[in-house]
Image (spheres, grey):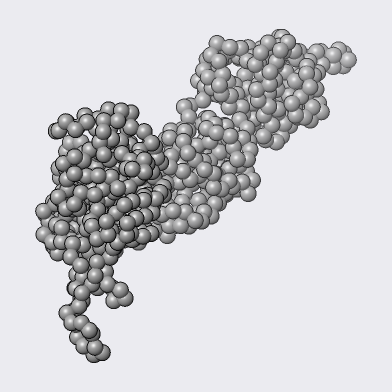
Amino acid sequence: MKHLLLILFCLYFISNQKAIAQSENCSAAITLTVMPNCSSPVAGATGLSQNIPGCVGNADDDVWYQFVATSTSHQITVTPSVGLDPVVQLFSGSCSTLISLNCMDATSTGQPETIYASNLTIGTTYRIRVYHYFTGGGSPNTFTICITTPPPPPSNDACGNAISLSVNASCVYTNATSLNASQSLPGCVGTADDDVWFSFVATNSVHTITVDPSSTMDAVVQLFSGSGCSSLTSLVCMDNAFTNGNEVINAVGLTVGSTYYIRVYDYYASTGGAPFQICVTGTPTPVPPNDDPCGAIALPVVTTSCNYMNFSTVGATTSSGVGIPTPASCAGGSPPQQGGFNNSPQPKDVWFSIVVPSTGNITITAQPGYGINDVAMALYSGTCNNLTQIACADDYNYPGTANDFKPFINATGLTPGSTVYLRYWAFNGNTTGNIGFCVTTNTHDNCANALYICDLNGYSGTTSAAFTVDRPCNMRALAEMNNPPTYTYTSGTCQGGIFGLGGAWGIGAPACDVRLDNNSWIRFTASNTTAILNVTVTNCFVGNYPSGGIQMQIFSAGTACCNFTPVSDFKEGSGTFTITANNLTIGQDYYLMIDGYAGDICSYSITANSGVQFPDITASSNPICSGDMITLYGPAGATSYTWQPGGQTTQDI
């Protein structure tokens, strides 16, 4: 009887094992149904033999399941008994052509394993294998298994949706997760199949980034620089700690006001990610001294030279209150044309003061390709606490398209010697960073007002957008027909204009495509029969010649700006070149005309090797005796003067 009971018990035990162990062959895999959650998992147990070799460990007890995908992502969870160390493997293909998609063995005995499967094809059958890592089936050898549809990925699954983090003096954590995220780009270490993204704006050159992961996550943290998600450069990849260990990046050499990107993911493949916390710490940048009009930075004396100056709006606040009118009627902007001051939050602005030169004209040009791209500015008269708007500029149609979100102001009729105030800001109220601009005066827009340069050596200027086309008398470009007021231009066709035409030496434009767009004029006196000018071109808006640059030529015309005759070769370029004027009459005035190639805006400087006369400086008495007090008279006609070594800027001293 005892033998019979023992046999019956063994038969019952074996039959019970078979009831939950499932098939030991792929071809007889038990079909599982995708569930909304894992509240009713299917019971199972490891088998007695191996179907195929294991992906890790010993698969001498593997059992098989299958399911039909109802989504492109599914979560497969195996929860073992205390004596089972499960390995879970996911396959595509038929049983005769299995392709391993995932092999999961991230935990130890008695702990669950989860595969977060992605890129599945809806309606396709996939197969799952479960076995005990060690030899034998585990004791006990039971488990439960379920297949669910995971929740949607985090909102910051892609770099373009990076969560903006604030920078604080001490760590203020932001709660996050990489659960169900997908891979954006290959990992710097480990497998980045669950990466999520964050961004922050540097408020100092040194910041600390801390990630505190949950107990099941081995976090990897990567820091990037770049102007956007399409141009990222990896700066640091941090993976010093293990599961549940904090990762810390001590970032140095950051640019204040620049945006940086952070990527966080779990080191291991297909673990699905986990919750974590992240913070960015650093010392805030102090409020700049020119945060309000009465702290405005005084800019240098305004000349024809476009010397770009660089500043920052980082740390600035929004200027408001009585005496500081909100920008209005900003040229180039969209309604209500307030340059972004209708945004929430409002832009953070900085201020500058400018002394109006004797010309009564100032031109403010944004620096191409530098700093914040979308910026605006306004010009005010009055006192720092009682301002009246003169002009406001938002977007401007600069040459090319890369700088069209930058502003431009050309203010005329100002009171010489008065002080005006320039307000500068980023259109987006959340944006701060670097800005660049130059302030010039441009009075030599036409030949009649040609700027007389007594010492052309060292002169600097610009083909400013403030300049308009001037065609006095017989002046026109090589490809322009003299039919005023239209001056028909035909590219590639020589219409006979003199700008671009060679002289007796035969050096003119390389092709018949020369036209006038924004020319300006300089007059000088020849001190030799030959004048040689070396020209350096910088900061072109369009770019390198022949896409952009400037074009120059020297002419004789007496003093009436008529009957122009080329006396030099014609040159165009965006780097350095030399212009040579020939057969000059000593003591006679000549005109140097400068034009933007295809209307480009560039800065330039001139070095006169020879041939340019410096007019005499006269004295109130001659000879001068030791101890005498005299006045030195500078030559007339210049817009600015500098005496050395004293640095005086008046015409006479």
Instruction: State the quadrant of the N terminus.
Output: top right
User: Does 469 appear above or below 293?
Assistant: above
Q: Residue at x 32, y 56 (%)?
A: 529
Q: Is residue 322 visible?
A: no
Q: Nearer the viewer, residue 308 or 392?
A: 308
In this rendering, the count of numbered labels is 0
Q: Residue at x 33, y 32 (%)?
A: 512
Q: Is residue 355 above or below residue 429?
A: below
- Viewer-nearest residue: 95 or 487: 487
Residue drawn 30% across and 28% down? 493
Q: Residue at x 63, y 38 (%)?
A: 190
From the top left corner, tell me how far across and down residue 155 is, in percent: 43, 33
Q: In the depicted view, which residue is nearer to us: 310 or 277? A: 310
Q: Is residue 163 above or below residue 131?
A: below
In this rendering, the answer to whether 277 lies above or below 118 is: below
Q: Position of residue 440 (x, y in %)?
A: 24, 55
Residue 270 in picture, x, y percent from top left: 61, 30
Observer able to see residue 537: yes
496 or 141: nearer the viewer: 496
240 vs 309, left or right, is right
The image quarter containing residue 80 is: top right
In the image, is 215 to the left or to the right of 421? right
Q: Quarter holding the C terminus?
A: bottom left
For this view, does 195 lie left or right of residue 155? right
Would you say 641 lies left or right of 142 here?
Answer: left
Indicate the position of residue 34 as horizontal and vertical percent values.
Answer: 55, 17
